[in-house]
Amino acid sequence: MTSEALYKTIFNDLCKQIEEGFYSKGDILPTEAKLGKKYNVSRVTIRQAIQLLAENGYVKKIQGSGSHVTYSPVKTTLDRSSKIRSFSEEMLSMQKVPSAQVLKFELTFASNQLAKELDLKEKDPLFYYERILSADDEPYCFEYGYMPTKHFPDFTITNLTGSKMRYIEEERNFSVVYSQQIVHAILADEKLHEYLDVSLNSPLLEVTHLAYTKEALPLHKTCTIFDSTKYQAHFIKIK
């Protein structure tokens, strides 16, 4: 068996053990030396297998501490294609406590592209924000977005620490009835590695959406980046 086939076989075996709960979230994997002895391979081969685990979101390597299991078998289903719900609503439905940490909140002006997407004039004012959304104090996603002052003149940082959807619907009396979404996979860079506590280059899910009223008025644009070990996309297609 080639070296490449060996480390992939070990990777698959460790994945199975983690997924089946032999190693739980927060556990530290055995050392490279112990794993090498167990699988009768070199430490280099073990290191390659663990690197693959880290890249796929199963473990986080911490210098001087070892490889910590980050995978959780319980996933939150992202069902926004069939039902629009806020992050707070999703987490509360799972008996989790939602929270938000606002990283940036500022006034900016619409680019030509944003103006087209949000039915604004170029350089119209908007609020731009960045925040980390957590459940039970564990980071789940990084979100950034644009809120036109035309629709949300009294939008404040306080509205971002709670449910943004509640502010939109209850305080501004807008009803969001559908959204246009674009979903694609990305890899964690330095910033997302820090914000979401994931390994560098681990797979993440990015969802960009424009929210609309029943009159087809585009209200706001949001981009949410999810830890793919906690979220999965669920789409319903109807013939």
Image: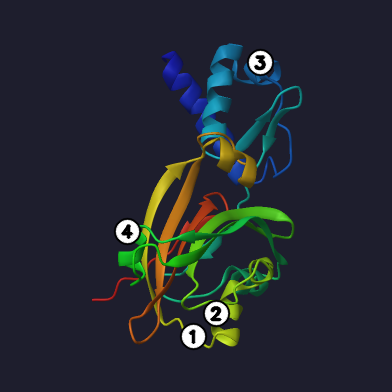
Q: Mark 4 or mark 1, which has the lower sequence index?
A: 4
Mark 3, residue position: 37
Q: Residue, x 63% and y 73% (percent of image)?
A: 163
Residues 55 and 177: in front is: 177
* Residue contact between numbered discs 1 and 3, judged by CB atoms under 8 Å: no
The answer for how far apart the CA atoms under marks 2 and 3 are is 58 Å
Specify which label sits upstream in the sequence, 1 or 3: 3
Identify the residue at image location x=41%, y=59%. 208
- Residue at position x 56%, y 13% in the image: 44
Q: Residue furthest left?
A: 239
- Which residue is disc 1 drawn over? 174
Which quarter of the rendered picture does the C terminus lie within?
bottom left
Select label 1 or label 3 by which is in front: 1
What is the three-letter code of the residue carrying label 2? Ile
Residue behind mark 4: 113
**Foreground mark, 3 or 4?**
4
Residue 168 numbered tag: 2
Disc 2 + disc 3, Cβ < 8 Å: no
